[in-house]
Image (cartoon, grey):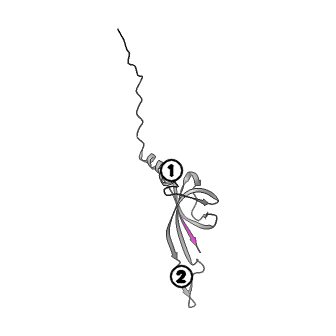
Amino acid sequence: MLDVDQNYGTPETPKPFPTFKECVAQDVQNVIFNSNEFAEERYIDDKLMLCITQHPGVLERPAHWEGGAKQSFDQGMYKADLLLFVKQKDYGPMPKSGKQITLDKKRIYNIKSCSLKAGMYRMELERVR
């Protein structure tokens, strides 16, 4: 007669489903900052990193009339705004408003505001010319 014990050990506990925040963090890493999708490599303060840029537009600076001519030399002729998204772990500590930032080793912007969401900084940049 054959006697067979069916001992397979203790069953593994199933892995819990990822939380929404964990899913978003994975999407930020694997989709949003994927160079084949949205991101591009650019120099930010002389450091090459993946980032996403959006150009809301170029606005003419308001001018005032003085002596029969339009005057706007004290504030620049126009301002160019730019939204910059960069991973917190790539950039480092959160920059303060008013800090100057250099893009692609040639364009200098002032940071108007910076916020941290889902592991990435959203910086509103302003360039006055």
- The residue pinned by badge 2 equals 63
Where residue 117 sits: x, y (%)?
Answer: 48, 54
Where residue 100 sits: x, y (%)?
Answer: 61, 65
Mark 2 residue crowding within 10 angstroms, few (<14) / some (14–19) / many (20+): some
Where residue 45 sits: x, y (%)?
Answer: 63, 60
Is 38 or 70 nearer to us in this picture? 38
Q: Is residue 38 above or below residue 9?
A: below
Helix or strand or loop: what does disc 1 sit on? helix
Is 96 or 129 nearer to us in this picture? 129
Instruction: Count numbered badges in the picture.
Output: 2
Q: Residue at x 58, y 67 (%)?
A: 110
Q: Is residue 123 magenta?
A: no
Q: Is residue 74 above or below residue 24?
A: below
The furthest residue to the top: 1
The amino acid type, in three-letter code, at marker 1 is Gln
Residue 58, label in figure: none
Residue 29, label in figure: 1
Where residue 91 sits: x, y (%)?
Answer: 58, 55
Is 100 or 33 nearer to us in this picture? 33
Please name the predominant secondary structure of the magenta segment in the image.
strand
Residue range highlighted in magenta: 124-129
Helix or strand or loop: what does disc 2 sit on? loop
The amino acid type, in three-letter code, at marker 2 is Ala
Which is nearer the N-term, disc 1 or disc 2? Answer: 1
Q: Residue at x 56, y 51 (%)?
A: 89
Q: Quadrant of residue 67?
A: bottom right
Q: Is residue 126 magenta?
A: yes
Real-space Cα separation, disc 1 to disc 2, in angstroms:
44 Å
